Image (cartoon, grey):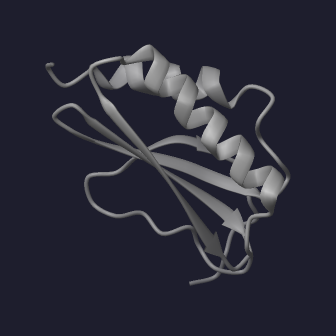
Amino acid sequence: MATPALKTVISSINRALWGEVSTKLRSVQFSLDGSRIAIRFFFDETPDDGDLNSMASVGAEVAADFPGCTVSEEAVATEANCPVPHDAGWRTAFARKEPSLAR
C-alpha cells in the first residue's frame, strides 16, 4: 500500500480523538513511514488506565481507516512545566493550549 496522504491521516486521528481526550493529554503526534503510522500520545505525568484505553481506541479507529497499514501507539509521560518534545519527522495532530514556558 502507498503511504497515506498527510491530510487523510490528520483527519482520521482527529476524528478518532473525539470523546477520548482527557485533561492529561497534552499532544498527539504521528509519523508516516510507508504503510506504517506511528502515533505518540504525550500526557501530563504517567497516563492512567483510562488514558491507555483511550489511546488504544484511537489507534484502533485509525487502523480501521487504513486497512493496509500498520498502526502503533506510544504513551509518553511528560512533566507539566516542560515543553512537549517534538522529534524531526513527526507531525502534530492535536495540541492543547498551554501556558507559555520559559526556556
Above or below for 82 versus 1: below
Please give left or right for residue 43 compared with residue 22 in the image: left
Front residue of 74 and 7? 74
Locate residue 92, reporting x and y percent.
47, 44
Locate residue 87, reporting x and y percent.
34, 64
Q: Residue at x 73, y 73 (%)?
A: 46
Above or below for 69 versus 98: above
Front residue of 21 and 67? 67
Locate residue 96, reporting x and y percent.
71, 48
| Quadrant of the rendered image containing residue 76 | bottom right
- Looking at the rendered structure, the number of numbered marks drawn on it comes to 0
Front residue of 56 and 75? 56
Please give left or right for residue 21 compared with residue 60 in the image: right
Q: Residue at x 74, y 75 (%)?
A: 45
| Quadrant of the rendered image containing residue 8 | top left
Residue located farthest toward the bottom when viewing the structure as drawn? 103
Locate residue 23, reporting x and y percent.
85, 53
Q: Residue at x 81, y 29 (%)?
A: 19
Q: Residue at x 61, y 52 (%)?
A: 27
Please give left or right for residue 17 compared with residue 35 in the image: right
Front residue of 87 and 102? 87
Above or below for 44 versus 70: below
Q: Where is the C terminus found, in terms of image quarters?
A: bottom right
Q: Where is the N terminus found, in terms of image quarters?
A: top left
